[in-house]
Amino acid sequence: MNDKEQRIEQALDKLATSTRSPRGEFSMEATRPLLEKRIAARRRTRLLRMVSAAAAVVVLCVLGWNTYLYMAPADMIIVSTLAETKVVQLPDGTEVTLNRYTSLTYPDRFKDRNRQVSLTGEAYFAVTKDKNHPFIVQTGAVDVRVLGTEFNVEAYPRDEQIRTTLFEGSVAIDTPGDNSLVLVPGELAVYNKASKLLSKSAAPKTNDEIAWRDGALIFSHISLKEISRQLSNAFNVEIVIEDQQLEEHRLTGRFIHGETLDTILSLLQDAGKFEIKRENPTLYILSNPKEPNV
């Protein structure tokens, strides 16, 4: 028993023994429990006030911290790839697969009405559905707006076009000139940077469009010009077709084992009957003078 408790005991004894009730109504035995009950009640009241005050302080601290987080600018995260693909999970659960030589910028938390990211290169998006917070992919010239869907965006700086292929759900494509269109699954939107024209069409073999996610390159009877574009982006090298007659020459090839650029070009060269000249850092495709024009 500490000093404080001893003083309380002495006070109780003094109060109880000071009564002069002839019937013992205020005797020590009868009064002591009443006084102890009253003191305990006061202690509980005081403890409750202390707990309430502490809780109020905690609530104010939490509100202040949440207000700070809301007002503070979000930190921006940049993820880039070189000669590899990479899967990134965004703060809302959206999963993004980045192709080679691609850069994605996004906030460490989505705090605004729109979930907005920036893309340079190519990426496949599986967006977490949230109808109250549209997801927007900025590519510089084109914005892709979605609520929850799966789509592929190809926006390499050296390309003449920005391509969006939709696999599931729906997306809206917006351009600076207030030109926009909506895609349904299986459609491809193409924006021409030079003419600033936006068009859509059926996407040819959409599975081939995203074969790169598995490290594969699949060319299904497509032009040498398109093959050169894809190889340029996949291996970060400039490829120039010097003979325009070769640009529309169509080839088919499946490269699913991580073949090198030299291997791919060698096989295509044998099939396409053209020559390749390397002048670092550029590759030139020329007609083979020993072969008839294609």
Image (tube, rainbow, N blue to C red):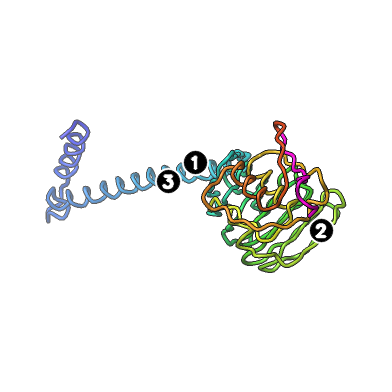
The disc label shown at residue 55, or none: 3
Quarter in which the N terminus is drawn: top left
Q: Give the alpha-carbon distance from disc 3 to disc 2, as whole Å.
A: 58 Å
Q: Residue at x 43, y 43 (%)?
A: 53
Give residue 23's position: percent from left, percent from top: 12, 56
Quarter in which the C terminus is drawn: bottom right
Give the structural element (helix, strand or loop) at label 2: strand
Foreground tag (2 vs 1): 2
Q: Residue at x 26, y 46 (%)?
A: 39
The disc label shown at residue 231, or none: none
Earlier sequence position, callout 1 versus callout 3: 3
Q: What residue is disc 1 on?
A: 61
Foreground tag (3 vs 2): 2
- Asked whether the beta carbons under mark 3 and mark 2 sit within 8 Å of each other, the answer is no
Give residue 42's position: percent from left, percent from top: 31, 47
Give the structural element (helix, strand or loop) at label 1: helix
Circle 1: residue type: Cys
Near-viewer residue (1 or 175): 175
Circle 2: residue type: Leu
The disc label shown at residue 198, or none: 2
On the rendered structure, is 235 left or right of 250?
left
Which stretch is magenta?
282-294
Q: Give the alpha-carbon distance from disc 2 to disc 1, as whole Å.
A: 51 Å
- Asked whether residue 133 appears in the rendered view, the answer is no
